[in-house]
Image (cartoon, grey):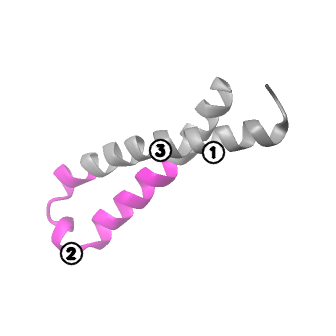
Amino acid sequence: MRSLFVLMFMLAATVFAGTFVIVVVATPGLYDQGMSAIPVAVGLGVLAGVPAAYVAARIIWRASGAT
């Protein structure tokens, strides 16, 4: 299950980080502080990817019938 978690983490972290960066760039109040807000957004995206990847990997693992 560890390798499945790693694959799901790579996908989830990329999606969350990209979404949060788009929010920073698209929000006028945050756009001016982009140099400091974008790394924070990426970090939050990576952190949000961990539980999402774990849940997705666990669901896929159980559905596959593996033990």
Amino acid at circle 3: Gly
Q: Residue 7's quadrant in the figure? A: top right
Instruction: Give the residue drawn at x 51%, y 53%.
Output: 15
Left or right side of 41 for 57: right
**Secondary structure state at the residue bearing disc 2:** helix
Which comes sooner in the sequence, label 3 or label 1?
3
Residue hosting label 2: 28
Instruction: Please tell me the numbered disc located at residue 56.
Output: 1
Residue hosting label 3: 49
Name the residue nearer the viewer: 2 or 46.
2
Q: Position of residue 52 (x, y in %)?
A: 52, 46
* Mark 3–mark 1 distance (CA, rounded to whole Å): 10 Å
Q: Is residue 25 magenta?
A: yes
Q: Position of residue 9 (x, y in %)?
A: 55, 38
Instruction: Give the residue drawn at x 37%, y 58%.
Output: 20
Instruction: Give the residue drawn at x 44%, y 55%.
Output: 18
